[in-house]
């Protein structure tokens, strides 16, 4: 029997903080507090609670208000890993990789056209507006607003129609442009800011938090995750020890190499493609890190010889690692 999708219980508390501000709901808050807030809660149960709370408060902006009282750290180690990343691109890719720590149903897609980039947030289980608002306001306040200046052309996109009153939206999202009736929920901004070094970047702390994320147990629905996602996670953890092999990964997944190859093919990918894509993405971030020599980057990506790393990097980017690093240090436009 397939297990229900679950999400972290961390995000129930901000809603309770807001509910406590409404007269006459003290009993509702105490009732909710008396329930055990487990590390993981059934997604549909949480959605039912939020719909119930919106009905009790008659406040369509409840999710935005809950986002306002959510501070950095509410999301655990992932929050700090996102904040200390070297660039916004690295932060977004990390959020994609570990989205399931927030919710099994959460899907984060990044779409770009060389001028604008969009972070598109969706749920495999249709979410009520309050949860969408909560998700967007939390990400904006903790992971976009601190990094994007007025020149980034930030737009906050909502798939629902424009509400009668925008007072709370404007309070939460400040000077960002609000776009309603959009084709997705999320954000859109100038892609030139993606590779700008973040003011909060801290390589040492970032590595500590990333290692902590690797030690976190995945939810009970881990076995229901696509095989490609599980393989990618194992590859990321094994790169430090050298180039992972399909045989070793298959063994850790308790299947034969032939089964691994066959099942990945049904998902439209392959072990080689997953490894190459992961190395490509990591290489773009590691090459521009100050203090890391190119041989160290090559080793971190599991290459036996630096020459092999140089050949792959040129295939990925059309440039050598050294030239790419020099261009990145001159600024995003040069890179």
Image (tube, rainbow, N blue to C red):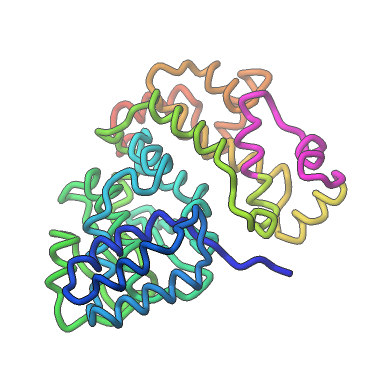
User: Does residue 330 sit above or below 109 in this rendering?
Assistant: above
Residue at coordinates 66% horizontally, 23% vertically from top-left? 241
Which of 65 and 316 lies nearest the eye of the viewer? 65
Image coordinates for residue 255, horizontal then vertical, percent: 84, 47
Q: Quadrant of the N terminus?
A: bottom right
User: Does residue 256 sit above or below 115 in this rendering?
Assistant: above
Which of 295 and 30 lies nearest the eye of the viewer? 30
Which of 128 and 85 lies nearest the eye of the viewer? 128
Task: Look at the image and tell me whether residue 322 can be seen.
Answer: yes
Task: Look at the image and tell me whether residue 109 can be seen.
Answer: no
Image coordinates for residue 185, horizontal then vertical, percent: 36, 68
Q: Is residue 242 magenta?
A: yes
Q: Examine the residues drawn in magenta and state their main secondary structure.
A: helix
Residue at coordinates 50% horizontally, 51% vertically from top-left? 101
The quarter of the picture where residue 72 lies is top left
Image coordinates for residue 24, horizontal then vertical, percent: 20, 77
Q: Is residue 20 magenta?
A: no
Q: Quadrant of the C terminus?
A: top left
The quarter of the picture where residue 202 lies is top left
Residue at coordinates 49% horizontally, 60% vertically from top-left? 7
Relative to 156, 117 lies left or right: right
State the extent of the magenta-drawn residues as a range.
Answer: 232-257
């Amino acid at each position: 029997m397939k297990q229900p999708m679950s999400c972290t219980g961390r995000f129930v508390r901000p809603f309770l903080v807001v509910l406590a501000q409404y007269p006459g709901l003290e009993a509702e808050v105490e009732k909710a507090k008396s329930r055990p807030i487990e590390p993981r809660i059934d997604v549909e149960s949480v959605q039912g609670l939020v719909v119930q709370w919106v009905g009790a408060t008659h406040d369509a902006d409840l999710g935005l208000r809950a986002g306002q009282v959510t501070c950095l750290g509410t999301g655990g180690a992932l929050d700090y890993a996102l904040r200390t990343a070297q660039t916004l691109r690295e932060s977004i890719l990390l959020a994609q990789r570990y989205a399931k720590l927030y919710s099994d149903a959460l899907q984060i897609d990044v779409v770009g056209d060389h001028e604008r980039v969009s972070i598109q947030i969706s749920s495999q289980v249709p979410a009520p507006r309050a949860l969408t608002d909560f998700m967007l306001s939390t990400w904006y306040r903790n992971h976009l607003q601190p990094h994007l200046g007025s020149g980034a052309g930030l737009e906050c996109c909502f798939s629902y129609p424009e509400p009668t009153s925008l007072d709370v939206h404007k309070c939460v999202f400040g000077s960002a442009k609000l776009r309603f009736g959009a084709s997705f929920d999320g954000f859109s901004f100038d892609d030139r800011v993606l590779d700008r070094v973040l003011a909060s970047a801290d390589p040492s702390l970032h590595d500590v938090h990333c290692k902590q994320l690797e030690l976190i147990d995945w939810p009970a629905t881990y076995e229901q995750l696509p095989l490609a996602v599980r393989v990618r996670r194992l590859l990321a953890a094994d790169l430090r020890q050298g180039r992972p092999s399909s045989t070793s990964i298959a063994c850790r997944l308790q299947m034969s190499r032939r089964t691994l190859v066959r099942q990945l093919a049904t998902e439209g990918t392959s072990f080689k493609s997953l490894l190459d894509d992961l190395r490509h993405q990591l290489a773009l971030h590691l090459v521009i890190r100050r203090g890391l020599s190119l041989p160290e980057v090559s080793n971190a990506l599991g290459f036996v010889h630096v020459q092999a790393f140089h050949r792959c990097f040129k295939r990925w980017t059309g440039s050598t690692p050294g030239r790419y690093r020099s261009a990145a240090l001159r600024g995003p436009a040069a890179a």
